[in-house]
Amino acid sequence: MRENQIINPYSIFMMLRFSYLFLMFMACVLLGSPDAVAQDSTGVKYTYVNARDLSVLGQSATVRDSGFHRIDAAERPKLPNAVARLATNSAGISVSFQTNSKSIKLKWRLAKYNTLWNMTPAAVNGLDLYAWNGKEWQYAATARPAKEQNDVLVLSNLDGQLRHYRVHLPLYAAAEEVHVGVEAGSTLQKADARFLPTQKVVIYGSSITQGASASRPGMAYPAILSRQLNLDIYNLGFSGSGKMEMALAEVLGQMDADVYVLDCVPNPSPEQIRERAVPFIKRLRELKPHTPILMVESVFRESTPWDQEKRKFDNGQNEEFRKAYEQLKQEKYKNLYYLSAKDLPSYDHEGTIDGSHLSDLGFMRVAPFVGKKLKKILPKK
């Protein structure tokens, strides 16, 4: 530069702007389109990535909502009001990714912070983080919810190795947005293909299917099965509302599935089962002529041995469901399977929260029995 040459401030501005844009471009390459860079109180900078840009499991392709819902907004007006409301809950949906960050933050926004008397806030509104330990998915941490908008450091002091993680979303709240935060400069990307299941299972059922009363999202039995059997499971459990209305057969029939599981006996009355089960299954079979259907009886309720009216009611539910199965078999319906209550685990009466809804212990007992049946039914890979 000549001694008397005047430096143009605009040229300096453009050079600095170009350098900034180049650095942001390189960050995008490494981190998969980060949404924001933020610095926490310790001075560590985190880059947040929308979970939509990672590997989302447990949500059918028929759901086009921006949120992590289970049935599309266009279909919900056709459903019973309770089902339409619960369909926005994020039960069964998870996000898989890989990162070498030495700490992980999770940021999520709920439509509403919900409370239930027989469930923990973590299960209703929180997030569960699992890590792949080389052999299986191992529980790592739970992101504590406090309000509608949450930003939590969930895991820290990691060794910096590239590792796969899975986040299970809330069971009884609607997660509208979820972001994964990693230390700036770290790798964050979608999961490898081997962690993305090729087989899909739709489980339609009651509050037990939805996850009541697991202590955290990863302990609902559909979530347990998804990890243990490497399945993409769509959790269509609706608390108190899995009653086999025909509109639900239409919704299920639109979803891509290798097996349908009907675990809905706890909600409808014996009379409703008698009226609805056969037409419901026939319609589902019309929509999916070759997809196996597994019918599951209700688990044991602790009041049954004591309350005589309840015993009659509970036994009547399972009896009517079995009659529906036998009728369909007599009518030569194929690919129809049945799991009796007597084939479910025998309890020591300590597997529930409130006599009906399963605790973590109850879910860990039930999952292997359903999983064993599924492994026999699922088409061979």
Image (tube, grey):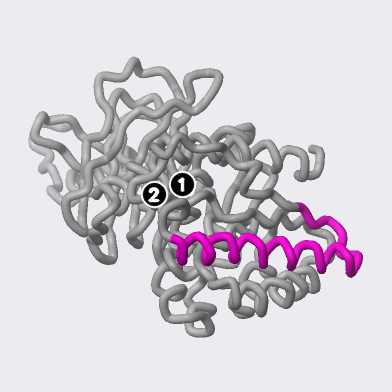
Specify the quadrant that holds the N terminus: top left
Q: Is residue 168 visible?
A: yes
Residue at image point 17% right, 30% down: 44
Indicate the position of residue 345 as horizontal and vertical percent values.
57, 37
Q: Quadrant of the C terminus?
A: top right
Mark 2 is surrounded, within 10 Å at the Cα level, by few (under 14), some (14 to 19) or many (20 or more) other residues, namely many
330 part of magenta stretch: yes
* Residue depicted at x 22% and y 35%: 153
Q: Which residue is mark 2?
A: 169
Q: Amino acid at mark 2?
A: Leu
Which residue is pictured at 39% across the width and 73% down the height?
Answer: 85
Of 75 and 214, nearer the camera is 214
Residues tagged 1 and 2 counted as in contact (Cβ below 8 A): yes
Q: Secondary structure at mark 1?
A: strand
Percent x, y of residue 38: 19, 42
Seen at 68% across and 57% down, the residue is 295
Any magenta on residue 314? yes
Up/down of 31 relative to 171, above or below: above
Q: Front-most of 225 and 76? A: 225
Secondary structure of the residue carrying numbered label 2: loop
- Residue bearing mark 1: 94
Secondary structure mostly taken by the magenta-highlighted segment of the chain:
helix
Q: Quadrant of residue 75?
A: bottom right
Q: CA distance from mark 1 to mark 2?
A: 6 Å
Q: Position of residue 105 (x, y in %)?
A: 27, 37
Q: Earlier in the sequence, mark 1 or mark 2?
A: 1
**Total numbered badges shown on the rendered structure:** 2
**Location of residue 69 with respect to 244 vertically, above or below:** above
Q: In front here: 276 or 143?
A: 276
Is residue 18 visible in the rendered image? The answer is: no
Magenta range is: 308-337
